[in-house]
C-alpha cells in the first residue's frame, strides 16, 4: 500500500475528480512539484502494469478502477487470516484444536500459539470468553456480543479498503447476502429516513450496512436476537417503533429475510445512534440537557484555549446531536469506523487535536453519568469533520492572498481581466486593487502579489507577468507564485520558531526504546529541569496520550498536554535511529511540546509544520541516520519541509 503522503495525494484526487496541475497539488499538500511527481511515480509502481494516476496536458487525475484495485488489495497476514477463520468457526459452533489445524492446514502447535491471540481478541469485545477443555474449544457469551466480535473482524479486514458493499456482504453475511440486495436496502432506507425528517450520515450508513449484513447473516444461520433493550435514556418510544417497523419491512422486501422483534429493535437503535440526526428545520433536536450544556461549555473552553471560534449555534446543535449519539455508542461499546481517519489525522493534525480536546472536555463534564468516552481515533475523526467544517467557514477568506492587477486602461479590458482572474483564482486570491496607469508606482503596490500585463522595472518573486486575456498558463504561473509565497512564509515562520523554542539541553540522541510513557517522562523531565513546566504538566501529557496516540505519522510523535500552562513555549526533541515503540507503531522522532498561554499561535505553526515535515518515512529514515546534533537536526527538518 502507498505511504501516507502518497495516500493524501490519492485522497485529494479521488475527492476532487478531474485534472489537477502539479502546482496546485503541491500547494495543497505543502510540497514541491517534484515531490508530487515522485508520489505519482510511487503510486503507479504499486500495481504491476497498472496506471493509478494518469498524467496529461491538464496535470494529473486518478483512474477509478485502478484505485479500487489498489485499495481493495488484501493486506492481511496469514496469521490474522487464521485467527479470523478460527473465530468465525467458533461463532457458529464448538470446535476441536486438531480439527482446526487440519482445516487450516497448519500444525497443532501453530493453532495453540494462535489461540492466545484469539482469546485476547475475544476478551477485548467484552461479554465473551473462549473456554478450552483439552482439545475442545467453545465460545461463551450472548448473541449481541458475538455480533460485535464478527463486526470487529470485518472492520479489521476492511481497514485499508474503500467502502465496498460487496465486501461487507461477503465478509459479514458469509455468502448469504448479495451486494445488490444490500445496496437496495441501503438506498430504500435512506429515502425513507429523509422522508421522516432526518439527515442521513453517508459515512455512518456504511456501518449500518455492515450491521445489517451481520444481522441477516446470523438470522439466516438460526442465530436471531431474542430481545434487545435499547440503552438510550429518555428515547422517544414512538420514534423507536417507527424505525423498527421500517427496518423490518425493508429487510423483508429487499433482503427476503424476516427479522424478529429483537433484531428489529437492535437495528433501529443502530440507525438512531449512528446514521441519522433530525433535520432541525422539520423536527426539534432532542438532546438531553446535560449533553447540550456539556458540549457548549466544552466548546467555549476549547475555543478559548486554541484561539478558535466554536460558538456558532448551528455548529453547537450539530455537535450536540453527534455527541448524544456518541454517548449511546459508548454505552454499547460499539465502534464506528471512519474511512478518513488516517488522512484527517496526518493532514489536519491541529484540527484533530482540537477534536481530541473537545471529546475530552465533554467527557469530563459528563463524568457523573459514569461514561467512558475513550472512544479511539475513528470517533474522534468524526468530531474532526465537524470542527474542520466549522473552521473552514471562517478560514476561506483568511487563506486568500491579496493581489493587485496592473492593466493599462483600454475600454473595458481591465474589467474583463479582473473578472477572469476572480473566476479562475477567486478561491486563492482577493483582488484588492486594479491599477490602469501605464506608469504605476510599483513601490506603492503592497499586496501579496502583483499581476501585471506590462513589464515591471525589475523582476520580483511577487510580481507575475500575465496576458491581457488570461490563459491557463497564466493561471499556472500565478498559482506557482502563490505557492512559493505561502511556502516561503511557512518556512521563515518555522525556522524562527524552532530557533526560539529548542535548546541543545533539550535534545536527546539516541532516545532509548523504552516505550511512549518513558519517552514522555524523559523529554518532559528536561523541560521540568529548566523550569518550563512542572511535573503535573508531564502527567497531563501522559493522560492526553491515553486518549489518542500522538503518533501523527509513521515516524513522528508529538506528545503534549492539552493545557497551555508552560512558563514559556519550548520543545524537547528525542531521536531514535532504530525506532521507539509507540502504541501499535514505531516512531523515530519524538517532540515533547510545551506551550504557554501567550504562544497559542506557535502551537499551530510548530505542530502542523512538524507533522507535515515527517510524513515521508523514507526521507525521515535518512534524516535520523545522518544527524548527530541539534543544529544538524534543524537543518535536516528545514530541508524536509522545502522538499
Image (spheres, grey):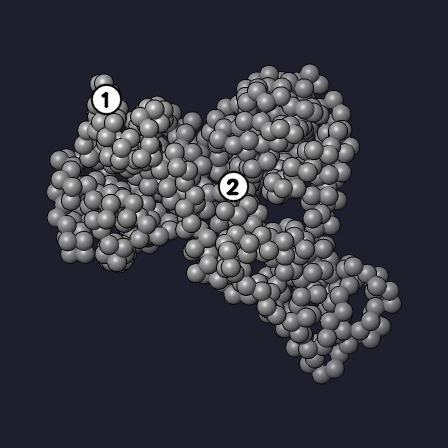
Would you say 71 lies left or right of 446 here?
left
Left or right: 272, with 38 as reference point: left
x 67%, y 66%: residue: 476
Of residues 300 and 631, the one nearer the viewer is 631
Query: In the image, 321: left or right of 557?
Result: left
Residue 494 picture quarter: top right
Pointer 2 residue: 345
Which numbered disc flags the more N-terminal residue, 1 or 2?
A: 1
Q: Is residue 189 above or below residue 556?
A: below
Residue at the right extreme of this rendering: 457
Task: Report whether 593 appears left or right of 342.
Answer: right
For image coordinates 26% across by 58% down, the residue present is 180
Q: Front-most of 341 and 241?
A: 341
Q: Few, some or many C-alpha atoms within 10 Å of disc 2 (few <14, some 14-19, many ≥20)?
A: many
| Spot occupied by residue 601 in the image (x, y as percentages of width and height) | 65, 39
Residue 641 screen position, x and y as percent: 69, 45
- The mark closer to the camera, 1 or 2, is 1
Residue under pointer 1: 135
Determine contact: label 1, label 2, CB under 8 Å: no
Element type where label 2 sits in the image: helix
Q: Quadrant of residue 88?
A: top left
Q: Residue 241: where, in percent of width, then height?
A: 16, 45
Tell me how far mark 1 sits from mark 2, CA to CA: 45 Å
Q: Quadrant of residue 472?
A: bottom right
Q: Please name the residue shown 12% across and 48% down the image.
A: 258
Label 1 neighbourhood size at 10 Å, few (<14), some (14-19), many (20+)? few
Residue 515 in view in this figure: yes
Q: Is residue 267 visible?
A: no
* Rendered residue at 65%/52% (across/down): 35
- Against 80, residue 317 (above or below) is below
Amino acid at each position: 500500500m502507498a505511504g501516507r503522503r502518497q495516500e493524501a495525494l490519492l485522497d485529494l484526487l479521488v475527492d476532487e475528480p478531474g485534472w489537477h496541475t502539479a502546482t496546485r497539488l503541491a500547494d495543497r499538500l505543502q510540497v514541491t512539484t517534484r515531490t508530487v511527481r515522485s508520489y505519482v511515480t510511487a503510486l503507479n509502481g504499486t500495481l504491476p502494469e497498472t496506471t493509478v494516476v494518469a498524467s496529461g496536458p491538464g496535470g494529473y487525475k486518478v483512474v477509478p478502477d485502478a484505485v479500487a484495485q489498489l485499495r481493495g488489495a488484501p493486506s492481511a497476514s496469514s496469521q490474522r487470516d487464521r485467527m479470523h477463520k478460527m473465530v468465525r468457526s467458533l461463532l457458529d459452533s464448538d470446535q476441536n484444536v486438531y480439527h482446526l489445524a487440519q482445516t487450516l492446514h497448519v500444525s497443532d502447535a501453530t493453532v495453540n500459539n494462535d489461540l492466545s491471540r484469539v482469546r485476547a481478541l475475544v476478551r477485548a469485545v467484552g461479554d465473551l470468553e473462549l473456554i478450552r477443555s483439552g482439545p475442545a474449544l467453545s465460545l461463551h457469551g450472548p448473541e449481541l456480543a458475538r455480533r460485535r466480535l464478527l463486526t470487529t473482524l470485518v472492520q479489521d479486514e476492511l481497514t485499508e479498503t474503500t467502502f465496498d458493499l460487496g465486501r461487507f456482504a461477503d465478509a459479514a453475511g458469509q455468502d448469504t447476502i448479495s451486494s445488490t440486495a444490500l445496496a437496495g436496502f441501503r438506498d430504500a432506507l435512506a429515502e425513507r429516513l429523509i422522508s421522516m425528517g432526518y439527515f442521513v450520515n453517508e459515512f455512518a450508513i456504511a456501518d449500518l450496512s455492515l450491521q445489517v449484513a451481520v444481522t441477516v447473516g446470523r438470522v439466516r444461520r438460526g442465530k436471531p436476537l431474542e430481545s434487545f433493550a435499547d440503552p438510550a435514556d429518555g428515547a422517544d418510544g414512538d420514534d423507536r417503533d417507527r424505525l423498527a417497523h421500517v427496518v423490518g419491512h425493508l429487510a423483508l422486501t429487499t433482503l427476503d429475510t424476516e427479522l424478529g422483534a429483537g433484531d428489529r429493535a437492535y437495528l433501529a437503535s443502530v440507525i438512531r445512534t449512528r446514521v441519522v440526526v433530525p433535520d432541525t428545520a422539520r423536527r426539534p433536536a432532542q438532546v438531553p440537557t446535560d449533553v447540550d450544556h456539556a458540549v457548549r461549555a466544552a466548546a467555549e473552553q476549547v475555543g478559548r484555549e486554541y484561539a478558535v471560534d466554536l460558538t456558532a449555534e448551528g455548529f453547537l446543535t450539530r455537535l450536540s446531536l453527534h455527541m448524544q449519539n456518541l454517548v449511546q455508542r459508548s454505552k454499547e461499546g460499539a465502534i464506528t469506523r471512519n474511512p478518513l481517519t488516517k488522512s484527517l489525522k496526518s493532514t489536519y493534525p491541529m484540527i484533530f487535536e482540537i477534536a481530541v480536546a473537545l471529546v475530552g472536555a465533554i467527557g469530563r463534564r459528563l463524568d457523573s453519568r459514569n461514561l467512558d468516552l475513550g472512544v479511539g481515533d475513528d470517533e474522534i475523526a468524526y468530531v474532526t469533520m465537524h470542527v474542520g467544517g466549522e473552521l473552514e467557514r471562517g478560514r476561506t477568506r483568511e487563506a486568500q492572498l491579496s493581489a493587485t492587477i496592473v492593466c493599462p486602461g483600454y475600454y473595458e479590458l481591465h474589467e474583463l481581466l479582473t473578472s477572469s482572474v476572480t473566476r479562475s483564482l477567486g478561491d486563492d486570491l482577493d483582488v484588492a486593487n486594479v491599477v490602469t496607469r501605464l506608469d504605476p508606482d510599483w513601490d506603492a503596490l503592497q499586496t501579496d502579489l502583483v499581476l501585471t500585463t506590462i513589464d515591471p522595472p525589475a523582476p520580483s518573486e511577487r510580481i507575475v507577468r500575465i496576458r491581457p486575456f488570461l490563459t491557463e498558463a497564466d493561471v499556472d504561473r500565478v498559482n506557482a507564485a502563490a505557492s512559493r509565497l505561502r511556502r516561503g512564509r511557512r518556512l521563515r515562520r518555522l525556522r524562527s520558531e524552532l530557533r526560539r523554542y529548542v535548546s541543545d539541553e533539550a535534545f536527546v540522541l539516541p532516545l532509548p526504546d523504552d516505550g511512549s510513557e518513558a519517552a514522555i517522562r524523559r523529554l518532559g523531565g528536561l523541560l521540568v529541569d529548566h523550569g518550563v513546566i512542572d511535573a503535573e504538566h508531564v502527567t497531563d501529557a501522559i493522560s492526553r496520550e491515553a486518549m489518542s496516540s500522538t503518533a501523527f505519522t509513521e515516524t513522528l510523535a508529538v506528545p503534549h498536554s492539552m493545557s497551555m500552562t508552560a512558563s514559556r513555549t519550548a520543545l524537547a526533541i528525542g531521536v531514535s535511529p532504530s525506532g521507539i515503540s509507540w502504541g501499535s507503531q514505531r516512531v523515530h522522532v519524538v517532540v515533547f511540546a510545551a506551550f504557554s498561554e501567550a504562544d497559542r499561535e506557535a502551537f499551530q505553526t510548530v505542530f502542523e509544520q512538524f507533522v507535515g515535515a515527517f510524513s515521508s518515512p523514507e526521507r525521515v529514515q535518512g534524516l535520523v541516520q545522518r544527524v548527530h546534533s541539534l543544529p544538524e537536526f534543524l537543518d535536516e527538518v528545514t530541508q524536509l519541509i522545502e522538499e
